[in-house]
Image (spheres, rainbow, N blue to C red):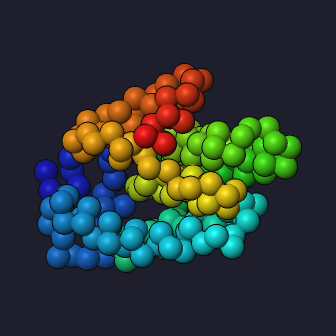
């Protein structure tokens, strides 16, 4: 099937045009791809978690796109660019810009009006970004988690642990995370709140 032809539980498949956006032609396995993506993401984390950034500065299209570009720009030509194909999750591709704008407006409203405690605000933004909008061809889960972490830090909270304290095997940890997202899809954000701090 080739490097990107398969899909594991919860991963978004790439269409052929997106797969051609791989900048490193020496990558031949999903394991190698994950490794170079993780290296790129590690470089983006300090920028994302700067403590001098206000929450309102994170709730902008510029930040959301710049963060994705910083996380994946060494790996994918389309990093920071909204998807132009439909996926197995998220709105129709042409709705992404307007849905991002609506999320930013809602997030700023929640922030300004104290609609949710900081932790819930962060996770509601994260959930809507990954489950409802799914703006980029790939990397949406990791991107949305780092957005939540950046928001948390800007609000004086610690970054989330995302289940790392549970000491689960990677596959089980991913299944637990996806179950929490599904609960949030159904209106119950409680499991995602607990998982984020576990």
Residue 85, above or below 131: below
Q: Residue at x 17, y 76 (%)?
A: 26
The x and y percentages for residue 16 are 30, 57
Name the residue rendered at 32%, 67% in the picture: 37
Residue 93, image x and y in percent? 54, 48
Q: Quadrant of residue 33?
A: bottom left
63 is higher (above) or lower (below) than 124: below
Locate residue 151: give its quadrant.
bottom right
Q: Is residue 85 visible?
A: no
Q: Residue at x 66, y 51 (%)?
A: 100
State the residue in front, 71 or 87: 71
The reply to whether residue 54 is in sight is yes
**In the rendered view of the protein, which quadrant contains the C terminus?**
top left
Residue 80: image location, x then y, percent: 52, 67
Locate residue 79 relative to residue 175 in the image: left or right.
right
Q: Quadrant of residue 65?
A: bottom right
| Picture coordinates of residue 128, whole percent (x, y) | 59, 41
Tell me which residue sits at (57%, 46%) in the image: 126
Q: Is residue 1 left or right of residue 23?
A: left
**Left or right: where does residue 151 sit relative to residue 117?**
left
Quick check: 43 above or below 139?
Answer: below
User: On the picture, is 137 further left or further right than 63?
Assistant: left
Q: How many marks?
A: 0
């Amino acid at each position: 099937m080739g490097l990107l032809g398969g899909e594991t539980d919860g991963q978004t498949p790439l269409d052929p045009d997106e797969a051609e956006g791989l900048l490193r032609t020496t990558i031949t396995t999903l394991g190698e791809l994950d490794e170079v993506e993780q290296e790129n993401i590690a470089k983006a984390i300090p920028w994302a978690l700067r403590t001098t950034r206000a929450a309102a500065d994170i709730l902008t299209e510029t930040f959301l796109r710049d963060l994705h570009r910083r996380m994946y720009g060494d790996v994918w030509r389309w990093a920071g660019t909204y998807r132009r194909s439909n996926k197995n999750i998220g709105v129709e591709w042409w709705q992404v810009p307007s849905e991002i704008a609506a999320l930013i407006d809602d997030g700023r409203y929640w922030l300004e009006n104290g609609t949710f405690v900081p932790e819930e605000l962060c996770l509601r933004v994260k959930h809507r970004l990954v489950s409802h909008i799914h703006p980029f061809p790939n990397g949406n889960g990791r991107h949305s988690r780092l957005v939540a972490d950046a928001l948390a830090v800007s609000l004086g909270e610690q970054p989330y642990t995302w289940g790392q304290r549970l000491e689960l095997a990677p596959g089980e940890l991913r299944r637990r995370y996806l179950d929490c997202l599904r609960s949030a899809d159904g209106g119950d954000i409680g499991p995602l709140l607990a998982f984020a701090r576990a």
